[in-house]
Image (cartoon, helix red, strand yellow):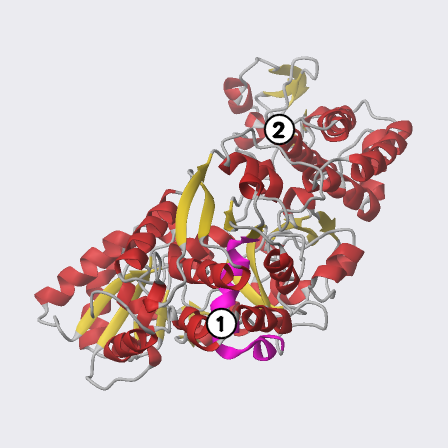
Amino acid sequence: MCNKINSQKDLLNMYENVKGLMDVRNFVDKDEKRFISVCAGPGCAALGANSIVENLRKEIKEHGLEGKVETDITGCFGFCAKGPVIKIYPDNVFYMQVKPEDAKRIVEDHLIGGRLVNDLLYTKEDGTLIKEQNEIPFYKKQLRIALNKVGLINPEIFAETIATRGYQALAKSLFELTPEQVIDEVSKSGLRGRGGAGFPTGKKWSFARASKNDKKYIICNADEGDPGAFMDRSILEGDPHSVLEAMAIAGYAIGADEGEIYIRAEYPLAVSRLQIALKQAYEFGVLGDNIMGTDFSFHINIKYGAGAFVCGEETALIHSIEGKRGEPTLKPPFPAVSGLFGKPTNVNNVETWANIPTIILDGGDNFAKVGTEKSKGTKVFALAGKVNNVGLVEIPMGTTLREIIYDIGGGIKNGKKFKAVQTGGPSGGCLTEKDLDTPIDYDNLVAKGSMMGSGGMIVLDEDDCMVDIAKFYLEFTVEESCGKCTPCRVGNKRMLEILEKITNGDGTLEDLETLKRLATVIKDCSLCALGQSAPNPVLSTMLGFPEEYKAHVVDKECPAKVCKGLLKYHIVENNCLGCGNCARHCPVGAITKSDKPSKNEHLMAYQINPDICIKCGTCMENCPAKPKAIER
């Protein structure tokens, strides 16, 4: 590769020189080579992905396969439930739950012997083995656009970014399109902000373009803080150059020469990959002064956040970058008019940026062919909770919740019954079984009392208490509130106190009415989206599961047997073995012998003093009787 890209021709020449790197991964086996991609996302890395790479390289060397087989890391493949995962090209074989010690078998059996390592393949319920990634149910209904290079390239090798058309969208923008035409393509795509609000991206850019000023800014919001969310982080870990390229394109479109990436310092791998990508981009001339020989200059800085959830709100984020307290401000003025340091600023989140290069290269109309009438393209979700196939998924807008949870997610763990799915994180709501056939898009989810959010999707089963779930999210919101406005600072705290009262068994029907009234006031009067949406988990669970709230306040029972304040532990004498195991493990001495015989006639049964019991469940865990002698 040349040292510097000084023109569009230089970029295209570099592409021609390195595109062969992808031949084997495009299932073109010209040189009879093989390539092994090893997922090195955080989940797989924690399970030994780097050791797998080392062992594979060692075995390849020992068996004289150097030059014939290459092995390298990639970003997240998404199938976290089955990690670590690897893919062998051009064989198109996908192995999962690979251990470092499996490297020897993979080399000797697969690469040399031509035999599949069957126990590492995906196995259907009927015993059928599936070797190809796209035939695995988890992947069949997915469509990768934002994630199109994540899991394909090594994000630390610049040549692989170039070999997959990296920075060609920027070159096309600079040499073939006017700023207005760039914005027009984004507008035609129908792309809406993937950070939660769903505001049309093209319109947002046009507002910033129309603002007149001597200085403008571009901001990437990488402050992903929803519980269970890891979409943006995975993009930055697996394809950071797509975000850098998109920010430069937006800078050209709106007339900005500087960008800021606001990312949590607690995401070390994403930060490291960003730093490497930035250094490469400057070194090869796709960022900096006079990009590709043009008069357009664009510089990007990284700003590290300290983990404040409220800084995901764009005005709070801007204040944090400025070195001020991360608090939101009333809008208008919007950042497009007065943002960072009072200058016009365009803010988009990571996933939004990741779609831009594809839109520019392939056209906005082509992107708009995917999705629904009002929600175009795809959406990345972090699928988590009580579902078999947890992981990172990207689906076309319009895919139903049922398809995600049952077809992609593989259904509910341990054969349990589906209860609800929480979308949108702390700002979202819980959807019930009657909502499973809802096509996913911005408007449908809002109409159901939830929202898209940044893309968290947590599946709940029959063992989850919906009152406790609402309390969990409200605890998070209360902790993360900046405290600037009274409705959020005080109102959410009062709501949380009521929920704690209910889960402790002291709630009343009047408390339920108070919750609804408080929620309405908080939604109407809070300053920013954090406060305005904080009551959503409470309202949606009250709407979807009124009988569960009623059980807590009227019957003083938690149907899911989760809320400690409503639990009682009881020993069934007829099942008790009289072994005393429960008493020995009780941390507070609440269990003593009773005057009744146990199942073993020679021993007395035990009993629990409810006034002493702290409801920790240790007794139940340590009871050897079958069925358990302790009921909850």
In the foreground, 262 or 586: 262
> Is residue 226 visible from the viewing direction of this image?
no
- Label 1 SS: helix
Q: Residue 284: where, in percent of width, then height?
A: 27, 62
Q: Which mark is residue 479?
A: 2
Nearer to the camera, 21 or 325: 325
Pick whichever of labels 1 and 2 is earlier in the sequence: 1
Q: Position of residue 92 (x, y in %)?
A: 35, 77
Q: Which residues are magenta?
A: 348-368
State whether residue 309 is above or below residue 129.
above
Residue shown at the point (73%, 25%) measured from the top left: 493
Which residue type does callout 2 highlight?
A: Glu
Q: Work out whether 435 lies above or below 462.
A: below
Q: Is residue 73 visible?
A: yes
Q: Quadrant of the C terminus?
A: top right
On the image, numbered disc 1 is attached to which residue? 358
- Residue occupying image coordinates x 78% and y 46%: 540
> For the view shown, which residue lies furthest in the bottom direction?
30
In the visual, does 427 lie left or right of 7? right
